[in-house]
Image: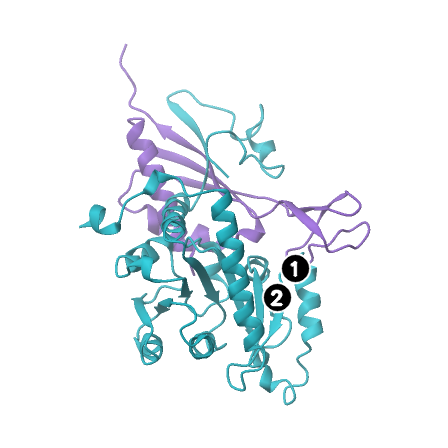
Chain colours: A cyan, B purple
């Protein structure tokens, strides 16, 4: 949505703006200004800048989200091994206090930038922008952004990613999409991780998880995989490759405008 | 708890608007929130006074309009008001629906206090 043409007037809020609505009156000595802009306007602006930056370098950006301990870093490790350098990837790690996750990625020879978020519960577009200063994006095909483990806050912040992938690990229970609809509604792919535990934790029904996703009108595909026994990994890798193709086709049809055409070195020294 | 971050972003915007229009202070901020925005109105209300300290919006009032969640069925075309985790068509039960409203988190308007010009 933009801020100028009135397209952010939704059926939900139009009653507030129309004559006689709460936003219409003005009192003497005061000025009422109609704004109609996202509360996260600045973040959204930075996010579109990031997205533009990714597009200019033909890089697919994937935001990985889940609760803590659902296996985001383990999935990245397994992905790096499975890819075996067939794609050049880099990782932006959001972690509260430690560099542990970034260290795990670096051990596998992959570039990882750690964003220490302190006590923050989510990454925002400015943090990702800052991290991008440490990369030469032209060297990579895919950038994974490992968000802070949290099924609530990260859902509200656009980082400039192209795709959201949410992990739902088997030990968490299959009703997470019903409990965290905002997060799961934003997901382009839902990965049922730690699927090697399905025979043990047999109260987790993948079909039921899918049912809860359909209840929130999500059309996202659902993929079972285990970073441990590697089942489902090939399907995941081919999904990534497919998304790269889709992205490249879209970029050929709608080339990136020169609006943000600069390298970060030029502008931000 | 990302509501404080959202409040700070809101106040930043309001400060810019007040500056642009030479306002002395801000008396009222009206925002609209849908349940699918991921923002909790009570948490926002609590964070608001903290975010306002030392800004033009200090002591201002925050009004939060809560918007309903409405979906339009892509099969039968009817619109229904629904719950956050049940976005299916109330009429025909199909899950292929489009969100009409309910994910907004929007700054609707601000009321500025301007210096009165003496006649």
Residues packed near mark 1 inside 10 Å, few (<14), some (14 to 19) or many (20 plus): many
Rendered location of residue A124, percent (x, y): 38, 56
Rendered location of residue A93, percent (x, y): 36, 68
In the orientation shown, which residue stands out farthest toward the left?
A: A269
Q: Which of the two residues, A29 or B86, is positioned nearer the viewer here? A: B86
- Residue A66 vertical position relative to residue A259 in the rendered view, above or below: below
Q: Please give the label number shown on residue A42.
A: none
Q: Write the residue at 59% across / 44% down.
A: B67
Report the side of B113 relative to B103 (left or right).
Answer: left
Q: Which of the two residues, A32 or A252, is positioned nearer the viewer here? A: A252
Report the side of B116 relative to A9 (left or right).
Answer: left
Q: Are marks 2 and 1 in contact (CB under 8 Å)?
A: yes
- Residue under label 1, please give it: B85
Mark 2 secondary-structure assignment: helix
Q: Which of the two residues, A236 or A184, is positioned nearer the viewer here? A: A236
Rendered location of residue A245, percent (x, y): 52, 57
User: Alpha-carbon distance for marks 2 and 1?
Assistant: 8 Å
Q: In this rendering, does residue B23 appear at all?
A: no
- Residue under label 2, please give it: A177
Report the side of B10 relative to A186 (left or right).
Answer: left
Q: Write the residue at 55% across / 71% down.
A: A236
């Amino acid at each position: 949505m933009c801020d100028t043409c009135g397209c952010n007037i939704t059926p939900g809020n139009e009653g507030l703006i129309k004559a006689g609505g709460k936003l219409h009156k003005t009192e003497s000595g005061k000025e009422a200004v109609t704004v109609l802009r996202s509360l996260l306007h600045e973040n959204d602006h930075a996010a579109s800048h990031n997205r533009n930056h990714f597009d200019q370098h033909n890089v697919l950006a994937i935001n990985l989200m889940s609760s803590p301990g659902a296996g985001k870093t383990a999935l990245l490790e397994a992905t790096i091994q499975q890819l075996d350098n067939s794609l050049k990837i880099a990782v932006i790690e959001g972690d509260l206090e430690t560099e542990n996750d970034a260290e795990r990625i670096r051990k596998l020879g992959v570039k990882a930038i750690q964003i220490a978020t302190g006590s923050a519960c989510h990454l925002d577009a400015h943090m990702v922008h800052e991290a991008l200063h440490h990369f030469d994006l032209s060297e990579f095909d895919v950038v994974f952004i490992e968000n802070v483990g949290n099924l609530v806050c990260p859902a509200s912040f656009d980082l400039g990613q192209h795709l959201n992938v949410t992990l739902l690990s088997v030990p968490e229970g299959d009703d997470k999409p019903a409990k965290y609809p905002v997060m799961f509604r934003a997901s382009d792919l839902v990965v049922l991780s730690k699927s090697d535990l399905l025979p043990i934790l047999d109260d987790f029904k993948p079909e039921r998880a899918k049912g809860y996703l359909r209840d929130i009108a999500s059309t996202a595909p659902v993929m079972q995989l285990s970073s441990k026994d590697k089942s489902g990994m090939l399907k995941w890798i081919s999904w990534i490759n497919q998304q790269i193709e889709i992205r490249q086709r879209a970029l050929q049809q709608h080339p990136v405008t020169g609006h943000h055409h600069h390298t970060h070195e030029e502008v931000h020294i | 708890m990302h509501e404080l971050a959202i409040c700070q972003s809101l106040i930043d915007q309001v400060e810019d608007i007040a500056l642009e229009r030479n306002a002395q202070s801000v008396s009222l901020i009206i925002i609209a929130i849908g349940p699918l925005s991921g923002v909790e109105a009570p948490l926002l209300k609590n964070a608001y006074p903290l975010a306002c300290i030392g800004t033009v919006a200090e002591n201002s009032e925050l009004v939060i309009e809560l918007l309903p969640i409405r979906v339009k069925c892509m099969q039968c075309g009817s619109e229904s008001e629904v719950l956050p985790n049940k976005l299916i068509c109330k009429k025909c039960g199909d899950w292929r629906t489009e969100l009409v409203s309910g994910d907004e988190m929007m700054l609707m308007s601000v009321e500025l206090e301007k210096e009165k010009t003496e006649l």
